Image (spheres, helix red, strand yellow):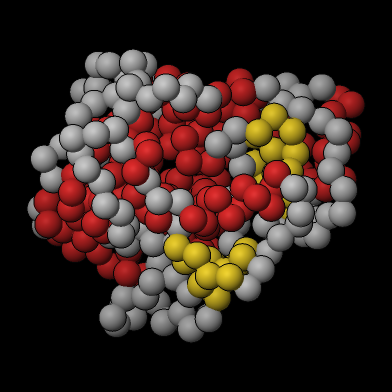
Amino acid sequence: MSKPKTVQNSSYGSQSTSRKVALAQAEKGNWYASIVSEVEGYRSRPYFDNKGIAIGNGWNIGQQSRKRNTELAFGIEMDGVSTEALLPYSGVQNPTSLPNVAITPEQSSKAVELMREQYEAPMRKLVPSWSQLKRNEQDALVYHAYKVGAGGAAKYTSMLAALKTYAANPSEENKLKVAGTFTYKYTINGTVYQDARSALYLGALFTSPEAYTYLLGTTKAPADFGKVAQLSGQKIDTSKPAEDQIQDDYGKAKEVLISRGIPYTVILQAAPQATAPAPTKPRVRNNAIVFWGI
C-alpha cells in the first residue's frame, strides 16, 4: 500500500510530542501507533484516568494486571525504581495518589506497540473478514478496541454488522457505513458528552489514509471528506486546515479534570446496537459499560 509522501511536513504550527510521533508513524504506514499518539496525546507522568491511573499514550495501569504491567515495564526498559513505584497501582480502580515516575516518548510509543496484540487479537475473532481489510482499516479497529476494551468492542453490534456487509460488498457506500459506527457517548461525573473528535479520526482512518493525513495537516482532503466529517457531526471546511475546526467538548472536559489532578468517572453509554441481534450471539442488554483506556 502506498504511503503519503509528505507526512512529516504538517501545515500545523503545533508540533507537540504526540503530533510528531503521529507524523513519524504515519510516514511508516503504522496507522495504529499514529492515531493512538494523535488522539490520546502524550503525558510523561502519571495522571488520574477513568478507573485508575494512566501514563504515556493512555497506558492505563489500573486496567492492567500486575503481570501485564510488569511485562510492559520490562518491554520498554523502565528502570527498576520506577517499575516498583508503578506496579502497586495495577488493578487499582480508585487511587488517591500518583507515583513519582516518568517515561519518555520512545518508551510510551514502545508500550503502545506492545499492547497492540492484546487489542488486535479480539478484533480478529470478532471480524471474520479481518484478512480482507486494508491496513488502515485494521488499524482503526485495533485503536477502537484500545479505547473501549475487547469486551466493549464486542458490544458494538452495529459496527460488526456493518463490517459483515462491507466484506460481502466492499463498496464506498458500505465503507462509509462502517466509518459511521465509530461513535462514543460518555457520561463524565453526570454530564453527557459525544466524543466527536475520536469519531472523526477513526472514521477518517477507516475510510482512507489520505482522509486521516488531512487531519494531521499533511495532505489535501479527499473529495468525499465532507461525508466522513458529517458522520461524526463535524463541519469541516476542507479548503482550510482541519485542526482548528474540530469540535472536542469531551476532550476539553477531561483535560480540565486531568490538569487539576481530579479523579473522575467515565461511563461509555450502551454501545450502538444492530437493528437485530447477530445470528450466533444473544442481544446485549447492558445499559452502560465502564470505559477503558482513555
Taking the spot 66% from the left edge, 68% from the top edge, the residue there is: 189
Residues 126 and 105: in front is 105
Q: How many marks?
A: 0
The quarter of the picture where the N terminus appears is top left
Q: As drawn, is 259 to the left or to the right of 97?
A: left
Residue 116, placed above or below residue 280: above
Give residue 106's position: percent from left, percent from top.
61, 20
Residues 119 and 33: in front is 33
Taking the spot 59% from the left edge, 37% from the top edge, the residue there is: 57
Q: As drawn, is 114 to the left or to the right of 83?
A: left
Taking the spot 74% from the left edge, 33% from the top edge, the residue there is: 45
State the image quarter where residue 128 is shown: bottom left
Give residue 144's position: percent from left, percent from top.
44, 51
Q: Tell me if residue 51 can be seen.
A: yes
Q: As drawn, is 59 to the left or to the right of 133?
A: right
Residue 110, placed above or below residue 235: above
Q: As drawn, is 187 to the left or to the right of 35?
A: right
Residue 284, placed above or below residue 30: below
Taking the spot 86% from the left edge, 39% from the top edge, the residue there is: 99
Q: Tell me if residue 141 can be seen.
A: no
State the image quarter where residue 204 is shown: top left
Give residue 240's position: percent from left, percent from top.
24, 34
State the image quarter where residue 31 is shown: top left
Give residue 17's position: percent from left, percent from top.
55, 24
Residues 238 and 3: in front is 238
